[in-house]
Amino acid sequence: MPIKRTYADMGDACATAHAMELISEHWAYIVIRELLLGAKRFSELLDSARGITPAVLTTRLRELETRGIVEPKELGAPTRIRLYGLTTWGRELEPIMNALGRWAQKSPGLPQSGGLTPDAAILAMRTMAPDVRLDPPIELQVRLSDERGRRTIAYDYVLTWDERGLRAERGELTDPLTAVDVDATLWADAVFNGAELPPGAVSGDHDQVTRLCETMTR
């Protein structure tokens, strides 16, 4: 196998070129995206990165660990479960990825079909949310799922939109006023395109969901 030469090997000291080399291999960005909201097991990453093989995922995780972007973590006894998470430096990629996502909206080849994983849908909201303050605030419990892979994946999120703007994180509310339980792609279609959510997807105050979707599409 030929040795892969970097731009630096060829005498180019551009830091931006080096940055692109760090994250540009096929699947590298997808792995990073799926870790931005929290650490995951190998099997979770395999289910989230559609089309990736175990061998390729192993290679990408090893490369990203070597570069200081990803770090493995092992839970203590009795589980001994290994998780993969972003390093502090790796988490600094989010605003860069957000800027790239906004830039890509003008691409003539922007995908018009396909789906999103739960984390990808939430990160898309964090990327595209307008700089708007809401009073009264919105607070939602959202559970997003994705059944397209080998196994169904689902995660819980807390969405808050107030005088500080939109915040969307993994987590659960003790007694939510409004809760949503829906497929991640259907949620993204509602949030970004104004599509109707399926019957039964929202429990509690439907107006909060309506306000959130209307604010996202301003």
Image: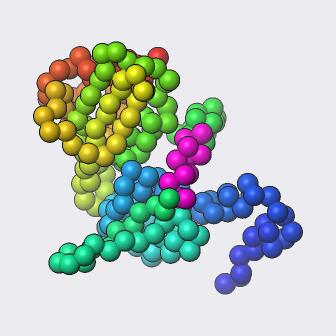
Q: The magenta stretch spans which residues? A: 89-99
Q: Is residue 183 above or below residue 149?
A: above
Q: Which quarter of the rendered picture does the N terminus lie within?
A: bottom right
Is 19 covered by the magenta stretch?
no
**Residue 93 at what x, y percent from top left?**
55, 51
Is 92 covered by the magenta stretch?
yes
At x 46% / y 20%, what residue is drawn?
Answer: 132
Model colouring: rainbow
At x 31% / y 46%, what residue is drawn?
Answer: 170
Q: Answer left or right for 72 relative to 6.
A: left
**Residue 79 at what x, y percent from top left?**
20, 75
Q: Residue furthest front?
A: 163
Residue 106 sits in quarter: top right
Observer-nearest of 171 and 128: 171
At x 14% / y 39%, what residue is drawn?
Answer: 174
Helix, strand or loop: magenta stretch: helix
**Residue 42 at what x, y percent from top left?**
35, 69
Q: Answer left or right for 71 relative to 44.
A: right
Observer-nearest of 111 and 37: 37
